[in-house]
Image: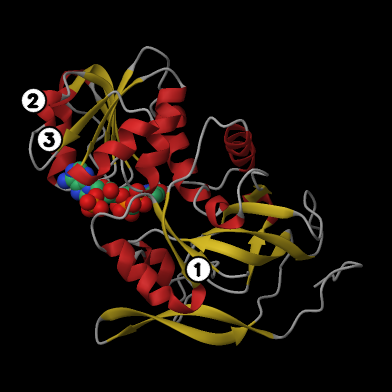
Amino acid sequence: MANEPGAERLESTMWALRVRVEDGLERVRYERVPLPSPGIGDVLLKVHAASFTPTELGWPSTWADRAGNARTAPIPAHEVSGVVAALGYGTTGLAVGDEAYGLTDWYRDGAAAGYVAVEARNLARKPGSLDHARSAAVPLAALTAWQALFDHAHLSAGQSVLIHGAGGGVGALAVQLARGAGARVVATGRQWAEGLVRELGADEFVDTERRSFEETAGEVDVVFDLVGGEVTGRSWAVIRPGGMLVSVVAPLAETGPRGASGVFFVVEPDRAALTELARLIDAGELRPVVGEVYPLERGREAFEAKRRPGVPGKVVLRVAR
Ligand SMILES: NC(=O)c1ccc[n+]([C@@H]2O[C@H](COP(=O)([O-])OP(=O)(O)OC[C@H]3O[C@@H](n4cnc5c(N)ncnc54)[C@H](OP(=O)(O)O)[C@@H]3O)[C@@H](O)[C@H]2O)c1
């Protein structure tokens, strides 16, 4: 590891959350672990705050590396905001002391820790107007929404989009990005989410426990599905001829009725998009929604909290004070 002049002196161990499967259940524990070493093109980021996706503990990438080798006690949470502490061999684009945020590789240890080793290309300068806790709530959620709406669905001004699960981590950002692009936004959620998603810019809200979206949404150009299950299959009925159904929950049919198409994808790190998202945030055009913040040592509670219904936006882990 190339320690830069002025870099802080690093200890050899750090506090982290690690996940183990015990009695068939994923258990999150707060433990002392070795400090990671940044590889070629990596930075070692001192983590100030991290966030996670509630379902990530069950994903295959949490339990195997890219070569398929088992990972026995992985560190979760792949959205991070922090300060560059050291550079790996040949790393460019960031310097020691820079404040950065980004989405880390699912197959490597995540950011629920004092430090994380992460490819510099997966990071960008953090939004200057946000503290680290709110900055950590952005990368995965905003990149997922951005890639769904613009890279896959090519949503444009004057079109309409139905966003299922609009009060959650991804949905709260998707509503704002779609509205900012000039689209008409119909949002679904449970009743608690109505005030939030209307404030974020939704033109219509469907409380799915009281009304069916098929009866109330009308026809839309794009459906962005953050709920899955039977909601995915039912969504084809509200898509205009030639429109698109985008899901990040589970693979779906590539073609639907009346020339509609379906896309499932997994979000990719993207420095250029993160830089543009930071610009939108600093311009006051986009804001993350943080439902709850937990200190790292209460990480288990944080994961449990986000599994319960009714938490708006993201749950964040505060690591450094
Ligand atoms: N493929 C990828 O790259 C990728 C990336 C990010 C996320 N994801 C997936 O996308 C999904 C959403 O992620 P997230 O982080 O936004 O999760 P989240 O914060 O839990 O948001 C999901 C939202 O959907 C709401 N909801 C649940 N059932 C509903 C229903 N029947 N009708 C309307 N709303 C409903 C939830 O409300 P309650 O709180 O009331 O239940 C919650 O607000 C997850 O399955 C996640 O794994 C995939």
The residue carrying mark 1 has its beta carbon less than 8 Å from ligand 1:
no
N-terminal of the pair, mark 1 or mark 3, is 1
In which quarter of the view is residue 174 placed? top left
Quadrant location of the C terminus? Answer: bottom right
Q: CA distance from mark 1 to mark 3?
A: 37 Å
What SS does tag 2 mark?
helix
Amino acid carrying mark 1 in the image: Ala
Dot label at residue 67 = 1
Amino acid carrying mark 3 in the image: Arg
N-terminal of the pair, mark 2 or mark 3, is 2
Q: Position of residue 71 (x, y in %)?
A: 46, 77
Mark 2 sits on what residue? 215
Q: CA distance from mark 2 to mark 3?
A: 12 Å
Number of numbered markers? 3
Quadrant location of the N terminus? Answer: bottom right
Q: Is residue 153 above or below residue 299?
A: above
Specify whether residue 70 is in view: no
Residue at left offset 53%, top offset 52%: 134
Q: Is residue 167 left or right of residue 146?
A: left
- Mark 3 crowd level (few <14, some 14–19, many ≥20, 10 Å Cα): few
Residue at left offset 61%, top offset 53%: 131
